[in-house]
Image (cartoon, rainbow, N blue to C red):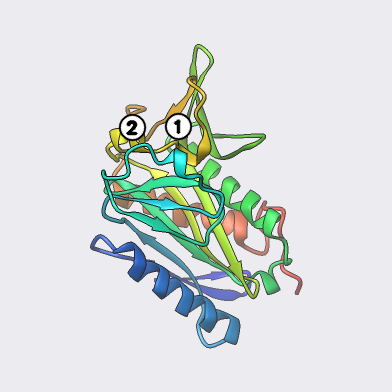
Amino acid sequence: MAQAISGTTVEWRTSPVFEPYETAVAAMEARAAAIHEGTAPELVWLLEHPSLYTAGTSAKDAELLDPGSFPVHRTGRGGRYTYHGPGQRVAYVLLDLATRGRDVRCFVHDLEEWLIRTLAGFGVTAERRPGRVGLWVVRGGGREDKIAAIGVRVRRWVTYHGISLNVAPDLSHFRAIVPCGIAEPNLGVTSLADLGIAASMTEVDAALAREFDGVFGAGGAGRCRPTA
């Protein structure tokens, strides 16, 4: 599937099977190089991984609490430890920032906005928090839970890696790590299912596609603009 975004064609791809992490990274790196060379369009790749942990460039060994639970992959994306697995929608976003403002902070802000709008469609108020990456849901009593994570890498102004949104994963799998380095007792992890929202992966994908142009398109509400 392809969408016309900002005067260009952004390809949308959905994997029907669990994608091995190393295979996905290799595919992203190859596609990012092709986008930079102008031989392939930008890409949003929707997928699920088998259960695994990834360690970003700021990950600390002490934050891996149970090293034997699932495979751990060291990765060049920003951030610390996170979990990927069944029931979590991962969206790898490969965009050419050379034509979109050359501002990585702006790009991350727009990824957050995309998730905020997508979750609003399911009746969920997701919020940014200073000093905490990702999107958070207020649960009451001073508790806040993370529902979506962001980790990006940029090479020659082409982005890759992206976002993960908890639809209905096994939240106990987050206990073997300190997710994104956040260990405060009032901060946890949630999902649409945990919030009582029975959304299918197909419905989540449709919402992500629907909200994308409103943020990343030429007339979108995101802060990053094409250089034209």
Query: Above or below — where is 193 with respect to 224?
Result: above
Q: Earlier in the sequence, mark 2 or mark 1?
A: 1
Q: Residue at x 30, y 56 (%)?
A: 49
Q: Residue at x 39, y 38 (%)?
A: 177
State whether residue 19 is above or below residue 105: below
Name the quadrant containing residue 154. bottom right
Residue 180 on image: x %, y %: 50, 41
Quadrant occupied by the C terminus? bottom right
Crowding at label 2, few (<14), some or many (≥20) Cα neighbours within 10 Å?
some
Q: Mark 1 and mark 2 in contact (Cβ < 8 Å)? A: yes
Q: Secondary structure at mark 2?
A: loop
Q: Determine the secondary structure under disc 1.
A: loop
Question: Residue visible at 55% across and 55% down?
Answer: 57
Q: Residue furthest front?
A: 62
Q: Using residue 199 as the reference point, say whether residue 57 is left or right of it.
A: right
Q: Amino acid at mark 1?
A: Gly
Residue closer to the observer: 21 or 136:
21
Real-space CA distance between mark 2 and mark 1, rounded to the nearest whole angstrom: 9 Å
Which of the image's four quarters has the N terminus?
Answer: bottom left
Instruction: Look at 26% across and 43% down and name the residue there.
Output: 69
Measured as percent of width and height from the top left, residue 168 is found at 30, 39
As drawn, 146 above or below 12: above
Per the image, the residue denoted by label 1 is 123
Q: Which mark is residue 148?
A: none
Residue 121 visible (yes or no): no
- Quarter of the rendering containing residue 176: top left
Q: Does residue 83 show up?
A: yes
Which residue of the protein is positioned furthest toward the top in this rendering? 141
Q: Position of residue 216 (x, y in %)?
A: 61, 60
Q: Mark 2 sits on what residue?
A: 197
